[in-house]
Image: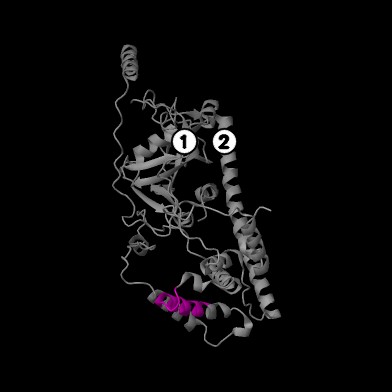
């Protein structure tokens, strides 16, 4: 396998390891493993909290009330249609704005706001081209398709894979680090082997972001009888395009889940060890 | 006195007029001679100038409604609630960040104790590293085409003759050993 010739040494110039020796690294009877926390970052901005919405509306109305009057005679020609439209809209805005003060409280509150929105939109010309806007809630959201990368666009999604065994089946993709290989190189290689090559992945630097030590359960088949367990070093990566391809040997299934949803898939000890690395939202 | 531009909010009509008239008096009279092409008749007494000056230098007072004690109390409560909300958000974010940092720190400390070579290769910085262009900032709405599932990785470039030679030597050595 050849290294890509590059002008400056990047993480990718060293990411492809030389396939010389495939002996695993074992230290103090624990196999060294690199895991991959593959994240799909949020694609859209978060929805505003109801309090935020109300507060911003309040601030807008305050600004309306406290700002100096607009020089209508400077910007609009006297007696023009634009002037009359503007004056009508301005009057309506002022009425709505003054509702925040106690001396102007009328009985009409919600209905007035709704009418306000409608009247503003009618003022715009229909001749303008319709701009197509995609919905913030996608088909994948509605069908709750866990394999889709279009789901939960506001949230951070993490990849978890299923191994063909009964207990501790769901986990982050991981694999053993070989001799003369760095953690990132091992992570990249394992991700390609387990999840296919049809993903645009970028590893965030070379440092591990988390550490998890575990002992193999009693029935586990080991290559070397003396190894008691494994020490996993998690590497952070981002996915920009593509999708996971299950190889059906090491990996049987996969899912893109949020931090909260992961609790339902992954074993308790694993979640407790891993949750601090993940983003809340 | 050189004319300095005051913002709309700080000048009254009378002072603005005074400053402007002084500036006009001190300014050297002249400009392009009346016959030159492109020279328009800038008559200072034109009402358009009056209007522009009023717009730029005067701040008309807003007609403030009658404020009550109740209004003030309401406003202060809203502001306090907002600040509290922001504080909670900030604290939650800070906790999340510190949890992540602790995991990172612990992992690197453990790695140092376990394997020196792995640790050294992990701590290696990259002074010329750039962030990829695909790291997109979240937008108001998603793209119309959605997620690109049909990603094809670019083909690997042909190795340079030097690396090719090195590879061939390496494979030859391996054959001899076997």
- Label pair 2/1, CB-CB below 8 angstroms: no
Q: Nearer the viewer, residue A131 or B87?
A: A131
Q: Which SS class for mark 2?
A: helix
Near mark 1 (Cα within 10 A), the count class, few <14, some 14-19 or many ≥20, is: many
Q: Which mark is residue A258?
A: none
Q: Could you give the CA–CA distance between mark 2 and mark 1, rounded to whole angstroms?
A: 14 Å
Q: With respect to residue B95, does A4 lie above or below?
A: above
Q: Main secondary structure of the magenta part?
A: helix
Q: Nearer the viewer, residue A182 or A174?
A: A182
Which span of residues is magenta-colored? Answer: A77-93
Task: Give the residue at x 43% y 77%.
Answer: A85
Q: Residue furthest right?
A: B69
Coordinates of residue B26 in the picture (x, y in percent): 64, 55
- Look at the image and say whether residue A133 sits in the magenta stretch: no
Report which quarter residue A77 is drawn in: bottom left
- Look at the image and say whether residue A91 sits in the magenta stretch: yes
Coordinates of residue B33 in the picture (x, y in percent): 49, 53
**Chain holding disc 1:** A
Coordinates of residue B28 in the picture (x, y in percent): 60, 52
> Which of label 2 and label 1 is nearer to you?
2
Coordinates of residue B38 in the picture (x, y in percent): 42, 54
Q: Which SS class for mark 1?
A: strand
Instruction: Read off the residue under disc 1.
Output: A33
Task: Give the residue at x 37% y 23%.
Answer: A20
Q: With respect to residue A177, does A126 lie above or below?
A: below
Q: Is residue A205 left or right of residue B81?
A: left
Q: How many numbered dots are placed on residues in this image?
A: 2
Report which quarter residue A55 is drawn in: bottom right
Instruction: Read off the residue under disc 2.
Output: B108
């Amino acid at each position: 396998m050849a290294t890509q010739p590059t002008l400056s040494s990047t993480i990718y110039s060293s990411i492809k390891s030389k396939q010389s020796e495939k002996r695993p690294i074992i230290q103090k009877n624990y196999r060294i493993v690199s895991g991959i926390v593959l994240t799909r970052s949020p694609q859209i901005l978060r929805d505003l909290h109801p309090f935020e919405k109300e507060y911003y509306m309040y601030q807008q109305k305050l600004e309306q009330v406290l700002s100096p009057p607009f020089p209508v005679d400077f910007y609009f020609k006297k007696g023009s249609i634009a002037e009359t439209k503007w004056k009508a809209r301005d009057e309506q805005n002022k009425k709505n704005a003054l509702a925040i003060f106690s001396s102007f409280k009328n009985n009409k509150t919600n209905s007035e706001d709704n009418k306000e929105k409608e009247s503003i939109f009618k003022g715009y010309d229909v001749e303008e081209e319709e701009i197509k806007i995609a919905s913030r809630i996608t088909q994948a959201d509605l069908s709750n398709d866990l394999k889709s990368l279009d789901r939960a666009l506001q949230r951070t999604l993490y990849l978890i894979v299923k191994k063909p065994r009964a207990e501790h089946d769901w986990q982050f993709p991981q694999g053993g680090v070989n001799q003369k290989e760095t953690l990132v190189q091992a992570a990249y290689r394992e991700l390609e082997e387990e999840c296919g090559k049809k993903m645009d992945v970028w590893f965030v630097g070379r440092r591990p972001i988390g550490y998890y030590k575990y002992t193999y359960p009693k029935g586990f088949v080991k290559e070397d009888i003396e190894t008691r367990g494994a020490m996993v070093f998690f590497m952070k990566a981002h996915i920009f395009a593509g999708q996971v391809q299950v190889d059906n040997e090491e990996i049987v299934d996969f899912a893109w889940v949020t931090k909260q949803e992961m609790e339902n898939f992954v074993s308790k000890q694993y979640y407790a060890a891993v949750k601090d690395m993940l983003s809340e939202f | 006195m050189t004319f300095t531009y005051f913002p709309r909010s700080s000048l009254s009509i009378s002072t603005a007029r005074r400053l402007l008239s002084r500036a006009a008096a001190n300014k050297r009279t002249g400009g392009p001679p009346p016959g030159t092409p492109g020279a328009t008749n800038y008559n200072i007494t034109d009402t358009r100038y009056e209007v522009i000056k009023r717009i730029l230098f005067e701040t008309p007072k807003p007609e403030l409604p009658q404020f009550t004690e109740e209004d003030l109390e309401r406003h202060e409560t809203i502001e306090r609630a907002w600040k509290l909300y922001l504080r909670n958000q900030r604290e939650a974010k800070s906790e999340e960040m510190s949890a992540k940092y602790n995991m990172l720190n612990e992992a690197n400390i453990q790695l140092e104790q376990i394997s020196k070579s792995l640790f050294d290769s992990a701590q290696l910085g990259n002074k010329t590293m750039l962030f990829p262009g695909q790291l997109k900032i979240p937008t108001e709405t998603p793209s119309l085409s959605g997620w690109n599932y049909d990603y094809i990785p670019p083909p690997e470039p042909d190795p340079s003759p030097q690396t090719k030679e090195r590879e061939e030597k390496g494979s030859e050595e391996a054959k001899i050993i076997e």
